[in-house]
Image (cartoon, rainbow, N blue to C red):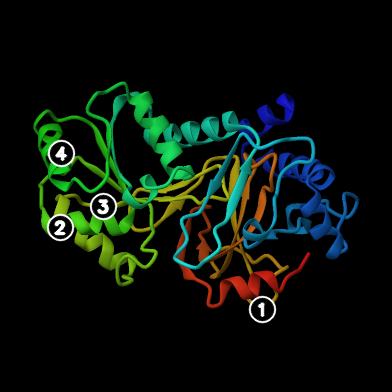
């Protein structure tokens, strides 16, 4: 599959659809669950000739099924955090090199050489378990910075504040990546004026705090860190690629990824840009699981290809599973 892998990471606007169709055919043949789903919708290799024809698998299937190519075994199983009593999604990753290649290339496309940064990770709820794809990514990026100042922080906010003061004084290019509730916890206790700091929230309240709008979260964080914009990362356990926002919740994705929206009342129909709907994601790096995923997020794709996340669907799990039960 080295040839297809190279096509994936060489994809551009003009070649994306042809590569996506090749990935669809590969997964239709090799991923049993996905083929069953397609068959239930009366879709097969011959009937799929454009992205609009491709069936998007409801993300809930990652909670109830093992989704992996029949000729592969998982090198790592990532699981979502979830809330108490909720079933976690599991992503059976057959090739960790694909994941590493995707998140490094995606990061460097958005921010430049990772070695130029100090990366601080405030991910307490994720660090407390050993199957987080976000921690795996952060750990690898931290190791690639080659800077002894890069590190994880659990609940030691005082140590984090001290490190931020040092990096601010030394004018180091610094990224603080944190789960939203942990950044807010820090912001309630401390303030620092570090205008050059990149504060990147990864989302995730997960019952830890009262839900807030993105605008409320970003206003609080901008005030606490003395920055003009709050960056965001859009990723999930079921994906191997990420999109990044450098402010105002406007996300851009790498060339091997694409975000579309589907009609809320006709979930098999894709919508035109600039119309709010449920979010579908194509992540070609998901080569050995499923690259075509119908999420429970609400969003809007802008005419320039960027996108915004507007919230979550009501009863997202019920609506998603109603598409098909295998």
186 vs 255: above or below: below
Question: Residue 122, can we see it?
Answer: yes
Q: Horizontal and vertical percent for residue 326?
A: 78, 64
Give the labeled residue for mark 1.
265
Give the labeled residue for mark 2.
223
Please identify, in this view, whether the residue under mark 2 or under mark 3 is nearer the observer: 2
Q: Horizontal and vertical percent for residue 308?
A: 46, 60
Give the labeled residue for mark 4.
164
Please identify, in this view, whether the residue under mark 1 or under mark 4 is nearer the observer: 4
Question: Residue 263, can we see it?
Answer: no
Q: What SS does tag 4 mark?
A: helix
Find the distance from the CA under tag 2 to the CA under tag 3.
10 Å
Residue 200 shown left or right of residue 262 in the figure: left
Residue found at x 30% / y 25%:
116
Q: Horizontal and vertical percent for residue 252?
A: 47, 48
Q: Horizontal and vertical percent for residue 228?
A: 21, 52
Give the labeled residue for mark 3.
229
Crowd rating for badge 3 (residues with CA inside 10 Å; few <14, some 14–19, many 20+) = many
First of labels 1, 2 by sequence position? 2
132 vs 89: above or below: above
């Amino acid at each position: 599959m080295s040839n297809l892998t190279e096509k994936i990471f060489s994809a551009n606007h003009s070649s994306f659809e042809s590569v996506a169709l090749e990935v669809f055919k590969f997964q239709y043949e090799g991923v049993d669950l996905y083929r069953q789903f397609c068959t239930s919708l009366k879709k097969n290799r011959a009937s799929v000739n454009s992205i609009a024809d491709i069936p998007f698998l409801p993300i809930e299937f990652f909670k109830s099924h093992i989704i992996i190519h029949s000729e592969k075994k998982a090198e790592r199983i990532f699981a979502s955090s979830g809330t108490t009593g909720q079933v976690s999604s599991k992503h059976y990753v057959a090739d960790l090199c694909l994941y590493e290649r995707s998140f490094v290339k995606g990061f460097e496309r958005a921010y430049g050489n990772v070695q130029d940064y100090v990366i601080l990770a405030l991910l307490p709820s994720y660090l407390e378990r050993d199957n987080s794809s976000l921690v795996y990514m952060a750990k690898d990026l931290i190791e690639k910075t080659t800077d002894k100042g890069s590190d994880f922080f659990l609940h030691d906010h005082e140590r984090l504040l001290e490190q931020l003061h040092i990096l601010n004084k030394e004018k180091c290019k610094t990224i603080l990546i944190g789960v939203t509730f942990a950044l807010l916890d820090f912001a309630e206790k401390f303030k620092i004026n570090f205008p050059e700091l990149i504060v990147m929230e990864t989302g995730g309240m997960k019952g830890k705090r009262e839900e807030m709008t993105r605008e409320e979260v970003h206003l609080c964080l901008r005030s606490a860190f003395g920055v003009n914009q709050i960056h965001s990362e859009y990723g999930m356990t079921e994906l191997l690629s990420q999109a990044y926002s450098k402010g105002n919740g406007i996300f851009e994705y790498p060339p091997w990824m694409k975000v579309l929206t589907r009609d809320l009342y006709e979930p098999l129909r894709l919508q035109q840009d600039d119309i709010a709907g449920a979010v579908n994601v194509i992540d070609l790096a998901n080569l050995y699981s499923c690259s075509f995923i119908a999420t429970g997020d609400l969003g809007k794709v802008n005419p320039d290809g960027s996108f915004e996340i507007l919230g979550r669907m009501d009863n997202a799990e019920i609506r998603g599973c109603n598409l098909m039960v295998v």
